[in-house]
Image (cartoon, helix red, strand yellow):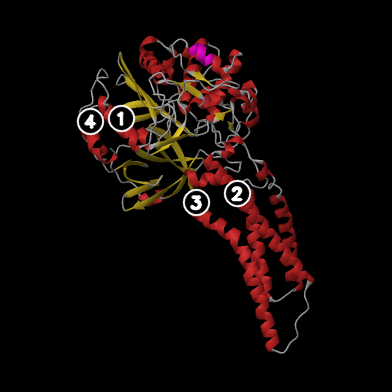
Amino acid sequence: MKTHLITLLLVVCTLLPTSVSGQLPDSLVLGLMDQYDVPGLSLSIVHGDSISTYGWGYADADRTIAVTPDTPFRIASVAKVLVAATVATEVAAGTVRFDEDILDIGLAPDGYAGPITLHDLLTHTAGFDERLIGYGARSSDEMKPLEHYLTDRMPSRGWPVGEQISYSNHGMSLAGYVVERARSLSFAEVARSNVFVPLEMHATRFLTRGESIPANSADPLRCTNDTCESVPFYYSHAYPAGLLFSSARDMSRFISALLQAETSENPLATLIPERFTHDERIPGMSYGFFNQYHKGVRFLSHAGSVPGYWSLLMISPEADMGFFFTANGGESGFGQQFRDVLLDAFLEDEAAIPPAPSITEDPSVRAGIYESTRYSHNTIERFPQVFHNSIEVTADADTLILVSGGRLRKYIQTGEALYQNINGSDKIAFGLRQGKTRLFRSSLVYGAEVPVAYEKRPWYRAPGFLNEYVSWLLGLPILVLMIAWPLSIAVSLFLRKRRGGTKPPTSLKWSTTWMMATLTAALFIVFGLGFVARSNRMLETGELFFGVPDTMLALTWIPFLHVGLTALMCVALVAIWKNRWWNLTRRLLFSIVTALIVLQVVFLAQWNYLPPSW
């Protein structure tokens, strides 16, 4: 089936109905599901007054429970749109305001000073750092009340408010907490009474502390070929940001309400206008929604992803249509492929217009390494984020080449500090924030195009350099101490013997300083492999979402001991040169080792391992 999929797509896309009254071909959908290992899929399409819902595949690993339009799935970050909708209803009721300073409720994150509003939270422009460690819970009983969690774990602000988009689960959950405080009810209850009940979204609910996963919901799965297995369910303390279950049928009602909002004086209409953009020439944010364009038509979108679940919501008031689909597993590439199939059913093809060059600068000035602003300034997450959040931009004549996620895209300048994909319509823009260069673009996530800001990095903060730098910090001191140092002694003894000299007595100063240097270097290796490298791996696998394990906590004393020994080495280094201990070669070798170990301390402090902070 997979070998004929491309041919199948080309044939079927020409046959897709222009109205949802027709049937979406099962062969096309099942072919895509097979290609991307999607076990179960549910879809709703709204076009004007017409609504169609579908279900394919299975909700469980044993393939005994069929997916239907009423099967609840965890829709992950699509929940943020429902948060924005709930806030909008409370604004309409007068209990909260989009422009109110939410810090008045008692939360006072550190970092940049100044007010934060619901407008900032719903557009991800409040400037909050990323924080993943401790974000998750292993069961709903372990979930903390929203107030307690946000008070204890709210990230600091790494950027001034309103400067740039920095996608934040905590920020969106804080918007939910503002509503919770204003109504003296849980946010889940407010969302239910304000949005879910009026729209008859009977299968939709936030999962809160102590509640069970809906009994008839789709299981999170991982499938390869013909085999599926369940994956652990991830709970989150900041539940408004993504711990929401819904069905395709329920989401069709939400889409209908959004499409009708502007003509019915519905408070949901406040979600539709674009509210913030990095550059007027590229798409930005609405309340809870990303903006993106397809064939010249503006869409509002949001994707969701947690282990075992994917989802995508897209609406276009201009085209009077929208759709939502959700899967309980599969690869990320399915989202874009299935999105494009659905869009081709409703949007007329446009003649491809190549970008018109407007060369006003040398593209090479834009080359470099850029890192997205979704990172933490002050925790141990900072170091691994460099490797996961960075993109490389190079220049070739009048073309910029952007490499991200293993994909290469070429852009040509079409305006002042503006470049367009030579094979598409997506654009990247450049600007300054706080006097530093920024790159602005949309990043593809399961079919949604997320507006992202990137900061330009100097060469010594690039992933390639850092990888080599840390390798040398780990290995070079030991190489000097265990190979170069003994070799220098052996050479010295050999030369002394040839000159007829006697073997010098063992020096207590020599043995003490050598042992101290070796111990210090060894401690860095133990901490580097046992804490730094392990925390990087555990962030990738999600294990640190539940907090730092005791086996890693047991290593957190190492950086402090390392600093103490480094200070003693610096004192010894002064004495060695002042008193001319040993010969010149060994003094130089000890100097090299001391310099490398001082750089180890700098590394630990710079990347928040001294003291370890999370």
Q: Are marks 1 and 4 in contact (CB under 8 Å)?
A: no
| Dot 1: element | helix
Residue that carries the numbered disc 3 in the rendered image = 463
Counting from the top left corner in percent of width and height, residue 532 is at: 60, 49
Residue that carries the numbered disc 2 in the rendered image = 532
Residue that carries the numbered disc 4 in the rendered image = 12
Mark-to-mark CA distance, 2 and 3: 15 Å
Closer mark to the observer between disc 3 and disc 4:
4
Can see residue 352?
Answer: no
Q: Which one is earlier in the sequence, the residue at label 1 or at label 4?
A: 4
How would you rate the neighbour count of disc 1 (Cα within 10 Å): few for under 14, some for 14-19, many for 20 or more? some
Query: Residue type at mark 3?
Result: Pro
Mark-to-mark CA distance, 1 and 2: 43 Å
Q: Are marks 1 and 2 in contact (CB under 8 Å)?
A: no
Q: Which mark is residue 29?
A: 1
Left/right of residue 473 with respect to residue 367 in the rendered view: right
Counting from the top left corner in percent of width and height, residue 138 is at: 59, 31
Query: Residue type at mark 1?
Result: Val
Mark-to-mark CA distance, 4 and 2: 50 Å
Q: Does residue 325 belong to the magenta stretch?
A: no
Query: Residue type at mark 4?
Result: Val
The residue at the point 52 percent across, 42 percent down is 540
Q: Which one is earlier in the sequence, the residue at label 1 or at label 2?
A: 1
Left/right of residue 231 with respect to residue 533 in the rendered view: left
Q: Which one is earlier in the sequence, the residue at label 3 or at label 1?
A: 1
Q: Are marks 3 and 1 in contact (CB under 8 Å)?
A: no
Closer mark to the observer between disc 4 and disc 2:
4
Which residue is more in the foreground, 69 or 136?
69
Please provide the residue range marked out in magenta: 190-194
